[in-house]
């Protein structure tokens, strides 16, 4: 049995937006920002940011799902709107693999699996273990290599940038802890979060380089 694991970067940004929105909402009402002396334009942007974060929260809750692949079936469960869908892998009538763009032009992969009951989409924007989830699907290998190469070529520079930025932040946190003689709980949480993102960035960087090298060696 295989269970979909949420994408690390997508989960992180959802957590950050929810945390920021929740904190701002708390302070806005605790400090009476909307009824106090704050100028109108300030109230407008505080309210707008709160509405945006609430909208993002509900969007992610709407899109969130649990994906299970077991005994030649794909089971997709949307717990927040009580929907369950099953795809029989023995009765597939369509299998489509392609790239798509999201978040500042970042390239992601998705596979649409269709049987007579409907279609389920699996993407690496949504699931961290995309490769494992789709490893047993009968995908055209030349097509798969092409979409993998396009993603690797397009995203490699972003991963390198992420590694430099995240490494710099980790170094700053370490020196800050040494300077202040210890890790505060918030700093420790940041350290762990940034460490996880750095690990994910290095992992993707190595995977992209391996894909590009493999394609170049076969040309």
Image: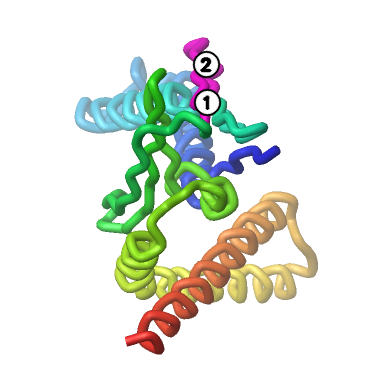
Local crowd size for mark 2, using a 10 Å CA cut-off: few (<14), some (14–19), many (≥20)? few
Q: Nearer the viewer, residue 20 or 91?
A: 91
Residue at the image position 43 percent from the left and 84 percent from the top: 213
Q: Position of residue 24 (x, y in %)?
A: 45, 31
Q: Which residue is mark 2?
A: 84
Residue at the image position 33 percent from the left and 24 percent from the top: 51
Q: Is residue 139 magenta?
A: no
Q: Which residue is mark 1?
A: 76
Residue at the image position 51 percent from the left and 67 percent from the top: 204
Q: Nearer the viewer, residue 113 or 37?
A: 113
- Residue 87 in view here: yes
Q: Residue 53 appears in which quarter of the rendering? A: top left
12 w.r.t. 68: above or below: below
Q: Secondary structure at mark 2?
A: strand
Q: Position of residue 197 (x, y in %)?
A: 56, 60
Name the residue furthest left: 41
Q: Position of residue 113 (x, y in %)?
A: 41, 36
- Give the extent of the magenta segment: 77-88
Relative side of 127 to 145, left or right = right
102 w.r.t. 88: above or below: below
Which of the labelled discs sits on residue 9, or is there none? none
Residue at the image position 66 percent from the left and 61 percent from the top: 191
């Amino acid at each position: 049995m295989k269970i979909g694991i949420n994408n690390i970067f997508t989960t992180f940004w959802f957590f950050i937006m929810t945390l920021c929105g929740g904190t701002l909402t708390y302070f806005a009402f605790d400090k009476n920002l909307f009824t106090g002396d704050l100028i109108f334009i300030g109230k407008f942007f505080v309210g707008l940011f709160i509405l945006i974060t609430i909208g993002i929260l509900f969007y992610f809750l709407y899109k969130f799902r649990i994906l299970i692949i077991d005994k030649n079936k794909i089971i997709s469960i949307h717990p927040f709107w009580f929907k369950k869908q099953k795809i029989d892998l023995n009765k597939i009538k369509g299998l489509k693999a392609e790239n798509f763009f999201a978040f500042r032009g970042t390239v992601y992969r998705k596979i649409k699996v269709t049987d007579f009951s409907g279609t389920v989409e699996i993407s690496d924007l949504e699931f961290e273990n995309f490769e494992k989830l789709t490893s047993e699907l009968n995908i055209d290998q030349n097509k798969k290599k092409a979409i993998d190469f396009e993603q690797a070529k397009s995203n490699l520079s972003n991963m390198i940038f992420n590694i430099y930025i995240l490494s710099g932040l980790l170094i700053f946190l370490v020196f800050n802890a040494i300077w202040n003689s210890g890790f505060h709980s918030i700093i420790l949480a940041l350290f762990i979060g940034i460490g996880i993102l750095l690990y994910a960035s290095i992992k993707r960087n190595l995977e992209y380089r391996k894909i590009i090298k493999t394609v170049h060696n076969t040309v």
